[in-house]
Amino acid sequence: MKVRHFSFLLVLIFAAASLASCGGGGGAPGSDDTNKTEVLIQSVLISAESDDIDVVSLPLLCDGEDEEPLTDANATMEISATTINQNPAFLSPFPANIEQCFISYTSAVIGAPIIESKTVYPNCSFIDGTTSCTVELLNIARKDQWWDDVTSGKFTPENGPTTYTVSYSCTYQNSFGKTGQLGGRMDIDLSNWLSCGG
């Protein structure tokens, strides 16, 4: 019986050691390297003006007037962060700059067109507190490609609108040049939504 207890204790010690050796140190899901950057990412919220993304603009569907032209769809990334060391004498790691974001698009809808991942450069800084940054969601070229893939028969979504999860994995740099990770995700619905303005 003692041998079993001792073995279990060893397993707990090794598990604790392996967790301690991993990076991070707390923070919001998708954040990493907290101990290295001294920046604690408390939350990252991704949202857009609308989750319904129009992928095509067709003429004469809005009571005899042209539908609104397509535009790039952007999202707002709201970052809440603070410094680990609250001592006023400690040099602040802020402002921190988002260097780049890797965006991926996944869908559970059978027959959904593939939207290739891409890297964007938001050119946004965030501070101790809450900061809003604008990041690309889906540009016109990708909307056109999606619509072409559907209308050509290359892909045939099982149902519509077609839902995608858009995931952001971003690299930031603190004021000392140390890098960390933050991220978030949101769902969007792609379809030929009627956009008549007014």
Image (cartoon, rainbow, N blue to C red):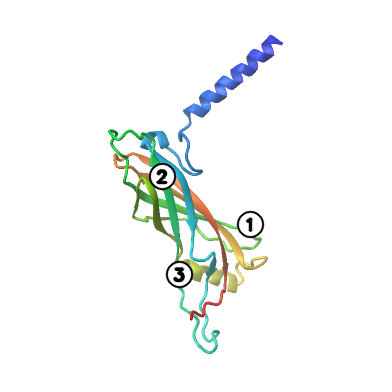
How many labels, in total? 3
Q: Residue 25: where, in percent of width, then height? A: 46, 34
Which residue position holds label 3? 140
Q: Outermost residue toward the bottom? A: 64
Helix, strand or loop at label 2? It is strand
- Tell me, yes or no, whether the two marked residues, 3 and 2, touch with CB atoms within 8 Å: no
Q: Extreme right residue here? A: 1
What residue lies at 49% left-to-right and 71% top-to-bottom? 144
On the image, the x and y values in percent for residue 97 come to 34, 48
Residue under pointer 1: 108
**Which of the two discs, 3 and 2, labels the residue nearer the N terminus?**
2
Q: Is residue 19 visible?
A: yes
Image-based side of 87 in relation to 60, left or right: left
Callout 1 environment at 10 Å: few (<14), some (14 to 19), or many (20+)?
Answer: few
Vertically, is 90 above or below 53? above
Task: Residue type at mark 3: give it.
Answer: Ile
User: Residue 38, image x and y in percent?
Assistant: 37, 36
- In the picture as drawn, the residue positioned furthest to the front comes out as 88
Residue type, numbered disc 2: Ala
Looking at the figure, which quarter contains the N terminus?
Answer: top right
Q: CA distance from mark 1 to mark 2?
A: 32 Å
Q: Nearer the viewer, residue 97 or 58?
A: 97
Which residue is label 2 attached to? 81
At 50% from the left and 81% from the top, the residue drawn is 67
Image height check: is 123 above or below 138? above
Q: CA distance from mark 3 to mark 2?
A: 32 Å
